[in-house]
Amino acid sequence: MSTEIKKIAVFTSGGDAPGMNAAIRAVVRASIYYDKEVFAVYRGYEGMIDNDIVPLDARSVGNIIQRGGTILKSARSKEFRTPEGRKQAYDNLRARGIDALVGIGGDGTFTGLHKFYEEFKMPVICIPGTIDNDLPGTDYTIGYDTATNTAVEAIDKIRDTALSHNRLFFIEVMGRDSGYIAINSGIAGGAIAAIIPEEKMTTDELIATLDKSDKRSSLVIVAEGGKSGSAIEIAKQVNEKFSYYDTKVTILGHLQRGGSPSYFDRVLASKMGIAAIEGLIQGKTDVMVGVRDKTMVYNDFVTTMNKDREIEPELLRIAKILSI
């Protein structure tokens, strides 16, 4: 294989996130700017195995920067987890002369690309596209800002009805094992508490917080992966101990994954897409693009995959002060 990269393929994998299309657009146009041929792999690793690979040009990615989801689609692939599946994917790529890969996704995408690089030494770079903002090595992941804004808009609407009826609302937000959406939407939405996976809050502690505030209409934000249970379970526990709370539960769910990306996610995705192509040209591989203190960085895959991102202590402190 030539040491000079000439043909690059881009794909999306795992859960969709607003801003993925902006990243695809940036990868395609940066590749063409640097005189590289660029290909799309549809349906992630599954499409790589099924040979669902097509060439792209600059016009192929016109009018997509404002669209949510991913035009390249996404799919889980059990077959890619096998040596035979990965070999078929590699053969399909090489049959077109493709000599580098850019993946847009989360830790599952990283794991697949890292294994692919280990076995075939094809240069690979990943762009972090996940609403969870749970990856170390970057201050923000693509889609997180939009998802959090979507959560805040919903919280504001729910607050209106909570105040009208003196109700206690438990609002469950996404984030998997990360509490970033919950803690920040809780602060921005004026919630009395945010229950996150990184910290366990008992029912007694929550009720003490509620009683201390002396309110009958309040909002509690619950991260879906919290150790204290789901929003439904927590609301039930509160009702069993204190029936004077008129409790309601709202689960925002996949509402947070859709919609037009915010300006922040569009710009972030554009920067990361260009950085991915420039990194490949510079000889970087087996890394994830990230942004730290407004500077683009490249993080080793192994380090990224083996670390959990912690919640910033300052966010916890701010949430505690504002809960009174």
Image (spheres, rainbow, N blue to C red):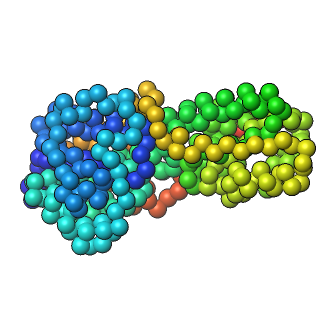
**263 displayed left or right of 187:** left
Q: Nearer the viewer, residue 258 or 215?
A: 258
Q: Considering the image in quadrants, where does the N terminus appear?
A: bottom left
- Please state the horizontal and vertical placement of residue 181, each as a whole percent of the image: 58, 42
Q: Residue furthest bottom?
A: 83
**61 displayed left or right of 70:** left
Q: Quadrant of residue 32?
A: top left
Q: Quadrant of residue 171?
A: top right
Residue drawn at x 84%, y 33% as measured from the top left = 166
- Please state the horizontal and vertical placement of residue 104, each as a whole percent of the image: 34, 47
Residue drawn at x 66%, y 50% as measured from the top left = 196
Name above or below for residue 217 compared with residue 133: above
Circle count? 0
Q: Quadrant of residue 220?
A: top right
- Whether residue 180 is visible, yes or no, is no
- Whether residue 155 is visible, yes or no, is yes
Residue drawn at x 89%, y 40% as measured from the top left = 212
- Please state the horizontal and vertical placement of residue 285, each as a whole percent of the image: 26, 53
Residue drawn at x 15%, y 63% as measured from the top left = 91
Name above or below for residue 80 compared with residue 161: below
Q: Nearer the viewer, residue 33 or 20?
A: 20
Q: Considering the image in quadrants, where does the C terminus appear?
A: top right
- Please state the horizontal and vertical placement of residue 144, each as a whole percent of the image: 50, 39
